[in-house]
Amino acid sequence: MNMTEDQLQQQALGWLASLGHTPLREGVELECKAAQGANGQGEVPKDFWPTYSAMANAHGGVVLLGILENAGVFSVAGLNDPAKVRADLFNNLNNPGKVSTNLLSDVDVQELVLDDQTVLAVRVPQAARKDKPVFLNGQPLGNTYRRLNDGDRKCDDDTVKRMLADQVQDSRDTRICNRFGLSDLDLESLHAYRNQFASHKPGHPWVGVDDTEFLRLLGAWRDDRNTDESGLTLAGVLMFGQWPAIMECAPLYFVDYQEQPDVPDTSVRWLDRVVPDGTWSGNVFDFYRKVIRKLTADLKVPFVLKGDTRVDDTPIHQALREALVNTLVHADYSDRASVRVIRRPSGFEFRNPGALRVPVAQALRGGESDCRNRTLQQMFLMINLGERAGSGLPRILASWRGEGRTLELTESFEPYDQSVLTMGWTPGKTPGKTSEKTSEKTSEKTPAGIHRLLRINPHMTIADLSAALGKTTRTIERTLAAMQEQGKIQRIGGDKGGSWKVLK
């Protein structure tokens, strides 16, 4: 929950003003506490701290101190000595024996006055990955909470351990799987990858090395100089492994593709399904190869030439590839949920096991890359799939949100941690008919398209705009130059690391 100081005051005053008109309701982002203390002078109540932990470990929220609840009815009790309550709050926040980390600054605690009564509005921000879990009493196990609906729920030990692993491990897929070697890999998968690598990077020095050296260079095999361990990494087993080896290294790993009807039918749960069933390797690379064909099987491709070569691709194809790769490289393969991809007539759904490493708004805005499985990410990058600059979701968003198509990213913690990217077609249109609209003749004018995309994501590059609009990079360059001369956009910063400002 990201609020400026003014926004916090406006939101909290709105809640307080509602007391005299409509019932105030606590929820996932709002909690009210009387905070009167034993002597009526005001103090931070004991039950504030589980709420602080819970909101910090979820999506943040606001706690109003000085609001009294009686049988579901809220009223302003006020605080006689708000300065004392504020001082008590920050003293405890800076006591590691009380709470693991202080996420608040002075601007996060505001005094608000209603009917001559002072209330403290405390904004609890969402904790960054390296601050989670936010826990109490010096011990994470048994003292970590998460906000679910309007309550503070104690996290089980497995959830806390996953938070701790995410906190200390920038990449979760680099650990060596002891005593795993080439015999645990599906060589057909590995060689298919190598062929794709050689096709994309002809003449690359890695093309001619043997399999073991190729795996080492790719990060699928690692030598640990500190422990003298040597062998396949988790990334190597996930990407190219045989099913029995994957199950030993990642017992909760499961990948699932389903084609479903829009209308639930108990007699037909799916029309097509791909799961590890013993007929194929079950690894990440083969899952990608099987599923991307099914996702794009009946998408019509407009006749577009690049020079003398037909380009059999559209922004829709690109968005679906990005979404599938994004799901596979960000998944927490130690979590209880599966990787699940669903195709319906109305659109697509991509589910990641594991919570997001950055807030939803930041993920959609881009500019900050925090991939859970960086070696897997690099493996896909080496065959020209995915991205590493924090622009994956913004690129998907820009490519997809055309002609009324919808995109939504959500994160939830029940019944397990997961994030879901939902990509919907325009209501009433079929995938084939929608994709026809991406041709040069029927697409929106280039300046209008650039204007729309830069409002969504001002960090888009010329290559991003070219992919999203189906135009050549030269066309994009000329249009950007013309729009700058017309005073419609302005470049802030250099070619690398800069951004665009839409002026009119």
Image (cartoon, helix red, strand yellow):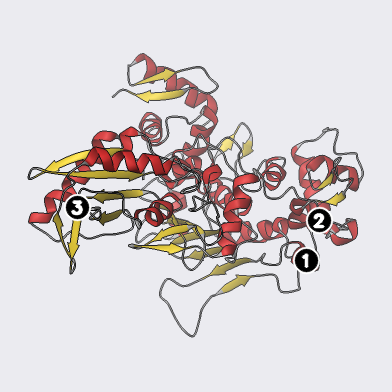
Q: Assign a secondary structure to mark 3.
A: loop
The percent position of residue 399, horizontal first and vertical second, equals 47, 43
Q: How far from the left and from the top, in percent, is residue 231? A: 86, 51
As rendered, which of 344 and 123 lies closer to the eye?
Answer: 123
Residue 74 rendering spot, x and y as whole percentages: 16, 60
- Label located before the other in sequence (3 or 1): 3
Tell me the residue that label 1 is attached to.
Answer: 248
Element on which disc 2 rests: loop
Residue that sits furthest to the front in the current view: 39
Q: Quadrant of the C terminus?
A: top left
Is residue 176 left or right of 250 when viewed as pictured?
right
Residue hosting label 2: 177
The residue depicted at 53 percent of the width and 47 percent of the height is 357
Quarter of the image containing the N terminus? Answer: top left
Is residue 60 shown left or right of residue 132?
A: left
Amino acid type of the residue tagged 1 in the rendering: Glu
Labels 2 and 1: the sequence-earlier one: 2
Quarter assignment of residue 250: bottom right
Residue 229 visible:
yes
Q: Residue at label 3? A: 40
Query: In the image, what residue occupies the spot 25% across and 50% down?
Result: 64
Res 303 visible: no
What is the CA distance from the residue labelled 2 to the residue labelled 1?
9 Å
- Residue lying at the far right of the rendered structure: 210
In the foreground, 159 or 384: 159
